[in-house]
Image (spheres, rainbow, N blue to C red):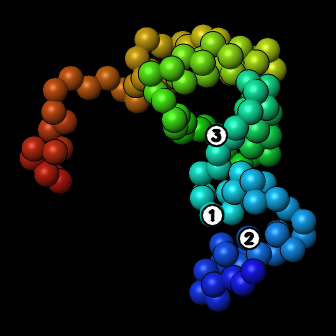
């Protein structure tokens, strides 16, 4: 096995392979993809998210699924309850809108700064 000399990701992958990591583990730990994939039980997925969150490596997550028609429901029904039990996924929101949740004031219509430019 030989790393591409101009690709740090491939150099790291070869190092991990020589250290005894399996190809699955190398891929699962974001060596090639900065967005790691988690495959496993609801508990294993929750473990991964919790590890990143507790380490301060993430303050939120973007999720992607192989099949959005079924997997989003599975995530909500299986993983979210585990995260709630562990106290790292809240149960309630104080506001009623996304703007309320992130502390952005309400806005109706187009923002005048967009149509009139800087003042």
| Residue occupying the far left of the picture | 116
Query: At 40% from the left edge and 17% from the top edge, which residue is drawn?
Result: 97
Mark nearer the N terminus (2 vs 1): 2
Q: Is residue 110 left or right of residue 66?
A: left
Task: Tell me if I can see residue 51 in this picture.
Answer: yes
Q: Position of residue 18 (x, y in %)?
A: 87, 74
Task: Tell me if I can see residue 87 in this picture.
Answer: no
Query: At 48% from the left edge and 30% from the top edge, which residue is drawn?
Result: 67
Residue ID for mark 3: 59
Q: Position of residue 82 (x, y in %)?
A: 76, 18
> How far apart are labels 2 and 1 at the CA level?
8 Å
Single out the mark in the foreground, 3 or 1. 1
Asked where in the image residue 55 lies, by quadrant, the reply is top right
Residue ID for mark 1: 32
Mark nearer the N terminus (2 vs 3): 2
Q: Is residue 117 left or right of residue 11?
A: left
Between 2 and 77, the one lying in front of the other is: 2
Residue ID for mark 2: 13
């Amino acid at each position: 096995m030989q790393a591409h000399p101009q690709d740090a990701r491939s150099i790291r992958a070869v190092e991990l392979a020589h250290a005894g990591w399996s190809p699955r583990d190398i891929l699962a730990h974001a060596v090639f993809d900065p967005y790691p994939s988690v495959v496993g039980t609801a508990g294993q997925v929750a473990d991964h998210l919790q590890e990143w969150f507790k380490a301060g490596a993430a303050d939120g997550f973007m999720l992607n699924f192989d099949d959005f028609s079924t997997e989003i429901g599975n995530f909500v029904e299986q993983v979210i309850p585990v995260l709630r039990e562990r106290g790292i996924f809240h149960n309630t929101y104080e506001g009623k809108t996304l703007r309320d949740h992130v502390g952005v004031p309400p806005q109706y219509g187009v923002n005048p700064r967009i149509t009139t430019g800087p003042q």
